[in-house]
Amino acid sequence: MIKRVLLIVLDSVGVGEAPDAYKYGDNGSNTLGHICDVTGVKLPNLGRLGLGNILPLKSVEADESAIGAYGKMQEHSAGKDTTTGHWEIAGLWIDKAFPTFPNGFPDEVIKPFEEKIGRKVIGNKPASGTKIIEELGEEHMKTGCPIVYTSADSVFQIAAHEEVIPLNELYRMCEIAREMLNGEFAVGRVIARPFVGTPGNFVRTENRRDFSLKPFSPTILDNLKEAGYEVFAIGKIEDIFAGCGITGKDHSTNNKDGIIATLKALDKIKSGLIFTNLVDFDMLYGHRNNPQGYADALKYFDDRLPEILAKLDDDDLMIITADHGNDPTTASTDHSREYVPLLVYSPSFKHGANLGLRQTFSDIAATIADVFNVKGTGHGTSFIDELPF
């Protein structure tokens, strides 16, 4: 009997273009495959779980004696952003993608926002987060005007130098924007993007915060909480779900701290769900088209994975997946519409198993509902009976 589930999202580690990738301009995207092609990164511990059995990888061989259950999942919802992916993992489907603003935000958004925060904004266009602070950071420091920008994803991002606009003020601006952005302007996330440094040497800090929409319906997290189980959120999970269904949290800001927080949670929490997002793959390397940095982050996780496995008991179930792709080898710096990996492991498994192609990320939510015998969300097919206990 499983008492505890550890769910780890390797943010943006996609495993090949989805059948509808062409609709998103993502033909040919294969985040993990291309990283292995370009860098030759070795991932022996993930390979032992069955990673190389999911798709052909140049530097991770298929393992006939894999100890985990493995497969891949196709996204049912419209979109390819963080919120959509995580909500689908938790059992919600989004039929209409969150709105995007390829020409920047209209005056009917910007002008009321400026009035409410008491400052003019600069930018207001799609941009790379690092490039826009290079471009407008000096002007921001001279004028005190926050930098507003978006991307191909459904986001309203506010960048500000921590010595010009203190963090609490930046977060307040984000809360104002979140309250305003509803209806046709209901972006998936408002994101605080603080930075420090001097012109020519600006660096984003780890004080990023995400302000998401509240889920429109109960997720598996809410159902677990209602049934009395612990739901411990690590990284940006609490932000993605706007606090809904969360009983405890650790706002780790990078992969190293997220892994440490996960190890601590495994020592402390004896039943329920531990839900971790490891953000560096996406934030630091995918969006910056840095395949070697991405590969190094994957290797770091792979190197630390045995520490996580050592803390799992026979009544634990670990699930490793992703929320979308972000292929650093393509011209795009944005998310890509890809399959995501599904790796499942328990020390009580008798052998490995092929879980095949899953039709929705929500198969994870359905499985968690079965594990804890709680109400499901109505989406997804449980794979609990396919696991090799």
Image (tube, grey):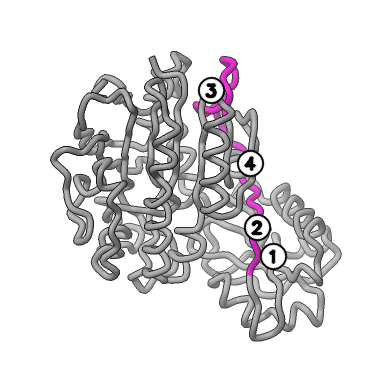
Find the magenta span and give its range: 204-231
Q: Which x, y percent locates residue 248?
A: 64, 32
Residues tagged 3 and 4 counted as in contact (Cβ below 8 A): no
Marks 1 and 3, how far apart at CA: 36 Å
Judged by depth in the image, the label closer to the viewer, 3 or 4, is 3
Q: Nearer the viewer, residue 39 or 26?
A: 39
Crowding at dot 4, Cα within 10 Å, few <14 / some 14-19 / many 20+, comes out as: some
The residue under the point 60% across, 53% down is 253
Kind of residue at disc 1 = Pro
Q: Nearer the viewer, residue 177 or 257?
A: 257
Look at mark 2 in the image and give the residue it sits on: 208
The residue under the point 49% across, 38% down is 87
Residues tagged 2 and 1 counted as in contact (Cβ below 8 A): yes
Judged by depth in the image, the label closer to the viewer, 1 or 3, is 3
Query: Element under label 2?
Result: loop
Image quadrant for the N terminus?
top left
Look at mark 3 in the image and give the residue it sits on: 270
Look at mark 1 in the image and give the residue it sits on: 194
Residues tagged 2 and 3 counted as in contact (Cβ below 8 A): no
Kind of residue at disc 4 = Asp
